[in-house]
Image (cartoon, rainbow, N blue to C red):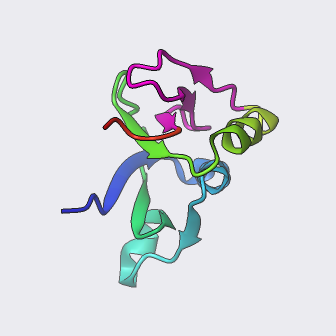
Amino acid sequence: MTLQHVSLEVTREQVPDELAFWAILGFEEVEPPGTLSQVAAWAQRDGTQIHLLFADDPVVPPQGHTAVVAEDWDATIAALREAGRDPEERTRHWGAARAFVHTPAGHVVEVMAVPPA
């Protein structure tokens, strides 16, 4: 099995900044099918999608997070810093670099150089 998508709640006003954030991580905006564009915006990378669900009062889980593997760790972390996102490097539990960063809407994303073995 493959994880196909993750859904995150955001306001409609946050969508452009959220899509710009996900673009740094290699996700491109794609058009949701049918009438789904009325309730969400989507971004995709290699078949995995981020669904930004429109909510008037979005919920951001305090400890929940989405994790992605960066093809080029150094360039990705530099691009996040340049965009003012301030990634916080964490313990290298499996010997590989990883950092937590917040999206503009406040969701936590773990960026990893490689996944755990």
For the question of whether residue 56 can be seen, the reply is no
* Direction left: furthest residue: 1
- Name the residue: 35% across, 22% down: 63
> Residue 58 lies in what quarter of the image?
top left
- Name the residue: 34% across, 52% down: 6
* Direction bottom: furthest residue: 34
Pick the quarter of the image with the C terminus: top left
Reply above or below: 116 against 91. Answer: below
The spot of residue 97 in percent (x, y) is: 54, 28
- Name the residue: 46% across, 68% down: 46
Reply above or below: 105 against 52. Answer: above
The reply, left or right, for residue 115 in relation to residue 17 is left
The reply, left or right, for residue 74 in relation to residue 28 is right
* Direction right: furthest residue: 82
Pick the quarter of the image with the N terminus: bottom left
The spot of residue 40 in percent (x, y) is: 44, 63
- Tell which of 21 and 55 is nearer to you: 21
The magenta stretch spans residue 102: yes
For the question of whether residue 91 can be seen, the reply is yes
The spot of residue 57 in percent (x, y) is: 42, 38
- Name the residue: 60% across, 58% down: 26
* Direction top: furthest residue: 91
The magenta stretch spans residue 37: no
The reply, left or right, for residue 60 in relation to residue 103 is left
What segment carries the magenta color? 85-112
